[in-house]
Every structure is written in structure tokens, then in C-alpha cells.
Image (cartoon, grey):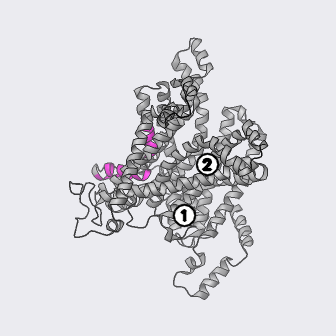
């Protein structure tokens, strides 16, 4: 297969090129990773569908009179109704939109911050490296959910769920910084970095055009694994009462209400369905992240061949 | 086996970390938009009274003075008094009362995780790529994907609501009162010689420990599996088998010790998620540990309690990781370098 790749010409189709990539072929032959991709795609489709179809204000308003309150799942109310007589089904679907949106922003923000800090620390070394990495170490000495809880308080309450995003971004940044710094240090030792420098490349050009692309693999794995974590942690903060405002159809908030008001009246559907969707989403990202890590680890590849 | 110099070096490294941790806590509280003076004086207090409270608290002093004073307080474990949660009670007292509750829960959860996670991981590695392996891997991945605040309520529904066999909240039946000696309910009930109370505590803690344990089990079995898979492939394992040792003995004697080293580090790193899990478990099962304390304190802007609790969590986490580092160097003396 490797000879095939080498003799291939520049005008190879994109499909063929993807097929030739050992990483992708490895990933796509992993049934668990495929399951993960399917789950993630499913959730993203649900999120987009819910965002387009439903009007948020309809989902927020109480529906006494229109719907029965705390009705068990039936053909009319697939996931039942909650204590405000709201149909849970569209609310759970809309929750996917919240999870995808806020999860994505958290992961992108912490990836950018972490990658920036990690690369700068690796390249400039000495004092810069020490200041950045020791700060990261201190942030890593807090249990993550607890640091997030404390950090939520520095953002004004009006920000709602964005407070959770801000807090978790700060919590995850050090992990990316560490991974990227390690990867960047390795790249900086390589001869082509030396050559690029000798050719007169500026620092930003060297870092962005040459160092960054060669660190992408570990960054991608870390982002994927962190995606699931971000979604579960945002929901946890909502569950604990920090983030979503009451009534907002986020999975964490629905779970919190379902546990507080529905558990002892036996309305299991109130917390069951939001939790199910949440768990499946997180499972999807964990399956994919795991598969990516296996596909990237050359030692794993050896055993498969 | 561990050299004194190594232990000393690791202990000295604690200070800058703890100093940094204290600084972060100070920064967080000063960045918070709320005003402690208003919280203490009450929403309806006059402006003069609020100013008076602010002056008494030293909040008018320059920031660096407040910072120095704060470091002094941290060093002497004096975090002042609670404004709201237990008004007037020293924060250190509240923490002493409630910390053992969380520690007991976390230790039991960790123990349950080890008890089931390690054998599962070993089994998975030995039977690599068989159905047993696939099943246990998917099970482990599901275990870390299911949030505690979902599995907890589900188990409450099943065992407490529908089957009615287990209690839903608290650590012990309300009929029992046991003098707190250690603060660990299982130990205290035994010390008091009250078996009925002990039984009640076991029944109450069962579900919280299972919920917390599932997550730990999933994490540890994953780690144990990948570590064991790596070790099984090593030359010395083949040598041992070539010498004619049965493969079970080889796995146990040579494999386990080596495979266990990275798992210990993970136990240390994951202690943070264990504590986070304990907070969520406490909330779901209404257990009065420092997890519920923190949530309560943040909700009611009780800054001294927030400060003390977050610091205690960070110190606990740091100390556990120090312990893990030292254990690690006992198991693998090469680490010292």
C-alpha cells in the first residue's frame, strides 16, 4: 500500500487521498469509532433540526391548560410532560442545540488559548516558558469541576450559560497548553525548523506555518476527548445551579428539575430522557476520541497489521 | 527504598504550588462581582452600615495588604467566619466537621472502583480482542460517559422509588444518633458499638458509593487494560513463558507489578475527578459533605466558606498526588531521576 501512495500523482481525487491516509483508514476500520461518528452526526442533526423547527419562547413558556402536567410518555407526548406541563420531547431535542453550541465554543476557545500558550512557551523557553507553564501547573492543581465552580462566580450572572463556557475554557486551557508544548518542543528539535529559520522566516510564520501543522495530531485527539468532557461538565454546572436559567431547555437544567421535582412523584421520564441524550452524546465523543488515539498511536497500528 | 533527598525535594516543591493555589483563590474572590460587605450587612442595610462593615473587614485597604493578610490566614488555617451558611461559625470548624464525610465517600468510591476495575482491566487485556474484551471496553466507555447526576437519580428511582429497598438520601437513618469521633460514619457507628446504626449507614451509603464507583471502575479498568496490554508484549514476559511458566503465573508475577505503575499515576490524576464526582454525588443524595457546602456557599455568596473549601480541595488533591509520586518511586526506583 505504501508504494501505491508514493507513486500516486498530484491530481489524485480527494477520496483516493483520504483512503491512502493510514490514519483515516485505521480510524474507519474501527467499528467503535464509526459508532461514535454516527452518534455525533445524529446529535448534530438533531441540534440543527431543533434550532430550525422550534421557537425557543414556546419551549420556555408553561403549558398549563394545553397539556396535562407530569404526563407519562405516550404517543402524543413521546417523552412525557414536565411539572410545567411542557412537552419534554422538543425540549430534549433543543437541548442538543445547547450542548453542541456551548460545547463547541468551549472546546474551540480552550484549544486556541492552550495552543497559543503551549507553542509560545515551547518556542521562547526560559522565563516565558516558566511563567506560562507554572501558571498552568497551578491551575492543574485544582480538581477541575471545583475550579470551574469557583470560576463561574467571576462572571456576571446575566451571562447565563456563557458563564459555564468561560469557566470551563479556563479549566481546560492548561491541558491543551501541556500537550501542545510537548509536541512543539519535539518539532522544534527537527532540522526543518532550523532550515526555515535560516531562510529568514519570522517567528509567527515559523510557528503558525511550520510548527503548528506538525502538532495537529495530538491537538485533535485532545479536542475530541475534551468535547465529551465539556458537554458533561457544562451540564454538571447547570445541574448544580450555575449556568442555565430556570426553564431553559438545557439537558443539565432539565435533569436538575427532574431530580428535584419529578423523582419522588415517580415522574422518571422527566430526568431520564435528557440524561439519555446527554450520555449518548458524550459516549459518541469518547468512542471517536478513543478510536483516533488508537489510530495515531503507531504501536497500536503495529499489532493490527 | 526512597531516598530522603527525593522526599525532601518533593515536599519543598509543595510550597510554590500551594502559594500559587492560594493566589488563584484570592484572585477569583476579588474578581467576583459580589460585595462581601453587602452580603454580611444584608440587602436592606443602610449605606453607612455597609461602609462600616467594609472597613471592619479591611476591604478598603490596598489590594496588596489584603493579599498579604490573606496569605497569613491561609498559612494559619484561619479563614474567618461564615457569613451565611453557618453564620458566625469559624470556617475551619465547618470544614473539620464536614471534610470527613466527603473523604469517606471518596475513599469508598475509589475502593469500589479498584475492586472491580482492576480485575476487569486485567481480564480485558489477557483476553485481548475477544468478545469479553470488547464488552468490557464498551462497558468502560459507557461508564465514563454516563454522568453521575443521571446514574444517581436512575438508581434512586429503581431501588428507592420502585423497589423500595434502599433509602434515597443522607448517610444514616434519622432514628440513629452517633457521637462523631472520626467523622467517618462507618467507623463512628462501630466505635459506638451500635450495629443497627452501622447497618443503617451501610444501606444509606450503598447507592452513593455504587454511583461514584461505576465511574472510577470504568476509568481504572481502561487504564489497567492498556497498561497490561503493553506489558504483556514485553520481552521479559515472553522469556518468562519460554522458561515454562504457566501464563497465569506470568501474568500475575511479572505483569501485574509492572502494569500497575502507570495505573497508580492515573489514580492520582483522577483523584480530582473523584472529588468532582463526590460533589455531584453529595448533591444527588443530599449528603452534607464539603461538596454540598461549596455549592451552598457559592449560591449564598459566603466568600470565606468558598475560599476555605476550594483551598482544602486543592490541598487534598495536591497531597494525594505527592503521595502517588512517592509510591511510584518505591515501585519504580528509576523515577527519582
Decide: few, some or many residues near mark 1? Use Cα within 10 Å; few <14, some 14-19, many ≥20: many
A251 relative position to B32: left or right: left
Name the residue furthest left.
A75
State which chain disc 2 sits on: A
User: Dot 2: within a 10 Å radius of its alpha carbon, few (fewer than 14), some, or many (20 or more) residues?
Assistant: many
Which residue does the numbered mark 1 point to in the structure image? A152
* Dots 1 and 2 on the same chain: yes
Is residue B47 one of those drawn in magenta?
Answer: no
Residue A145, located in which quarter of the rendered image? bottom right
Sequence order check: which comes first, mark 1 or mark 2? 1
- Is there any visible trace of residue B152 in the rendered image? yes
B79 versus B282 height, above or below? below
Element type at mark 2: helix
Question: Is residue B251 shown left or right of residue A28?
Answer: right
Judge by depth and name the residue closer to the eye, A20 or A229.
A20
Q: Label 1: state its secondary structure.
A: helix
Chief secondary structure of the magenta portion? helix
Q: Identify the magenta region.
A: B139-161
Assign the C terminus of chain B to one quadrant of the image.
top right
Which quadrant holds residue A214?
Answer: top right
Q: Quadrant of residue A74?
A: bottom left
Residue corresponding to mark 2: A176
Q: Position of residue A8 (x, y in %)?
A: 55, 28
Instruction: State the image coordinates of residue B114 (x, y, percent, origin top left).
Output: 51, 38
Amino acid at each position: 500500500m505504501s508504494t501505491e501512495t508514493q507513486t500516486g500523482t498530484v491530481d489524485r481525487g480527494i477520496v483516493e487521498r483520504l483512503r491512502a491516509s493510514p490514519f483515516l483508514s485505521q480510524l474507519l476500520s474501527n467499528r467503535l469509532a464509526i459508532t461514535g461518528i454516527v452518534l455525533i452526526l445524529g446529535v448534530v442533526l438533531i441540534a440543527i433540526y431543533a434550532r430550525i423547527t422550534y421557537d425557543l419562547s414556546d419551549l420556555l413558556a408553561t403549558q398549563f391548560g394545553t397539556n396535562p402536567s407530569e404526563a407519562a410518555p405516550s404517543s402524543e407526548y413521546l417523552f412525557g410532560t414536565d411539572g410545567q406541563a411542557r412537552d419534554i420531547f422538543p425540549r430534549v431535542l433543543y437541548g442538543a442545540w445547547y450542548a453542541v453550541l456551548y460545547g463547541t465554543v468551549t472546546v474551540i476557545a480552550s484549544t486556541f488559548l492552550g495552543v497559543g500558550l503551549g507553542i509560545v512557551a515551547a518556542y521562547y523557553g526560559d522565563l516565558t516558558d516558566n511563567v506560562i507553564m507554572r501558571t498552568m501547573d497551578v491551575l492543574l492543581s485544582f480538581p477541575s469541576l471545583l475550579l470551574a465552580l469557583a470560576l463561574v462566580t467571576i462572571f456576571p450572572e446575566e451571562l447565563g450559560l456563557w458563564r459555564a463556557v468561560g469557566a470551563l475554557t479556563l479549566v481546560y486551557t492548561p491541558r491543551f497548553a501541556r500537550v501542545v508544548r510537548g509536541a512543539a518542543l519535539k518539532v522544534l528539535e527537527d532540522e526543518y525548523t532550523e532550515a526555515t529559520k535560516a531562510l529568514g522566516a519570522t517567528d509567527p510564520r515559523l510557528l503558525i506555518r511550520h510548527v503548528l501543522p506538525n502538532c495537529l495530531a495530538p491537538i485533535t485527539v485532545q479536542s475530541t476527548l475534551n468535547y465529551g468532557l465539556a458537554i458533561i461538565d457544562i451540564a454538571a454546572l447547570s445541574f448544580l445551579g450555575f449556568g442555565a436559567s430556570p426553564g431553559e431547555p438545557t439537558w443539565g437544567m432539565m435533569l436538575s428539575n427532574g431530580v428535584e421535582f419529578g423523582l419522588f412523584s415517580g415522574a422518571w421520564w422527566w430526568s431520564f430522557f435528557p440524561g439519555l441524550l446527554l450520555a449518548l452524546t458524550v459516549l459518541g465523543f469518547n468512542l471517536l476520541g478513543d478510536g483516533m488515539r488508537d489510530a495515531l498511536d503507531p504501536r497500536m497500528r503495529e499489532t493490527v497489521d | 527504598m526512597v531516598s530522603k533527598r527525593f522526599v525532601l525535594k518533593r515536599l519543598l516543591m509543595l510550597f510554590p504550588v500551594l502559594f500559587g493555589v492560594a493566589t488563584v483563590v484570592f484572585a477569583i474572590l476579588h474578581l467576583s462581582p459580589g460585595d462581601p460587605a453587602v452580603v454580611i450587612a444584608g440587602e436592606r442595610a443602610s449605606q453607612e452600615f455597609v461602609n462600616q462593615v467594609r472597613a471592619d473587614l479591611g476591604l478598603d485597604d490596598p489590594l496588596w495588604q489584603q493579599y498579604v493578610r490573606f496569605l497569613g490566614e491561609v498559612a494559619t488555617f484561619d479563614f474567618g467566619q461564615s457569613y451565611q451558611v453557618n453564620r458566625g461559625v469559624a470556617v475551619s470548624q465547618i470544614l473539620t466537621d464536614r471534610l470527613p464525610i466527603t473523604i469517606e465517600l471518596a475513599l469508598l468510591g475509589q475502593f469500589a472502583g479498584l475492586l472491580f476495575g482492576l480485575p476487569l482491566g486485567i481480564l480485558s487485556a489477557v483476553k485481548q480482542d475477544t468478545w469479553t474484551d470488547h464488552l468490557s471496553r464498551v462497558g468502560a466507555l459507557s461508564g465514563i460517559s454516563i454522568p453521575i447526576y443521571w446514574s444517581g437519580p436512575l438508581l434512586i428511582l429503581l431501588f428507592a422509588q420502585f423497589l423500595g429497598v434502599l433509602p434515597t438520601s443522607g448517610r444514616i437513618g434519622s432514628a440513629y444518633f452517633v457521637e462523631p469521633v472520626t467523622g467517618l460514619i462507618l467507623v463512628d457507628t462501630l466505635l459506638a458499638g451500635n450495629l443497627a446504626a452501622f447497618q443503617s449507614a451501610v444501606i444509606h451509603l450503598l447507592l452513593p458509593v455504587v454511583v461514584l464507583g461505576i465511574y472510577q471502575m470504568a476509568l481504572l479498568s481502561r487504564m489497567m487494560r492498556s497498561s497490561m496490554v503493553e506489558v504483556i508484549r514485553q520481552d521479559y514476559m515472553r522469556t518468562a513463558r519460554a522458561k515454562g511458566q504457566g501464563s497465569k503465573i506470568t501474568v500475575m508475577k511479572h505483569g501485574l507489578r509492572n502494569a500497575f505503575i502507570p495505573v497508580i499515576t492515573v489514580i492520582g490524576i483522577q483523584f480530582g475527578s473523584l472529588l468532582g464526582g463526590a460533589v455531584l454525588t453529595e448533591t444527588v443524595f443530599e449528603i452534607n459533605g464539603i461538596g454540598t457546602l461549596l455549592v451552598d456557599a457559592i449560591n449564598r455568596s459566603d466568600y470565606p466558606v468558598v475560599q476555605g473549601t476550594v483551598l482544602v480541595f486543592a490541598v487534598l488533591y495536591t497531597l494525594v498526588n505527592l503521595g502517588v509520586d512517592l509510591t511510584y518511586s518505591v515501585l519504580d526506583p528509576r523515577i527519582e531521576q
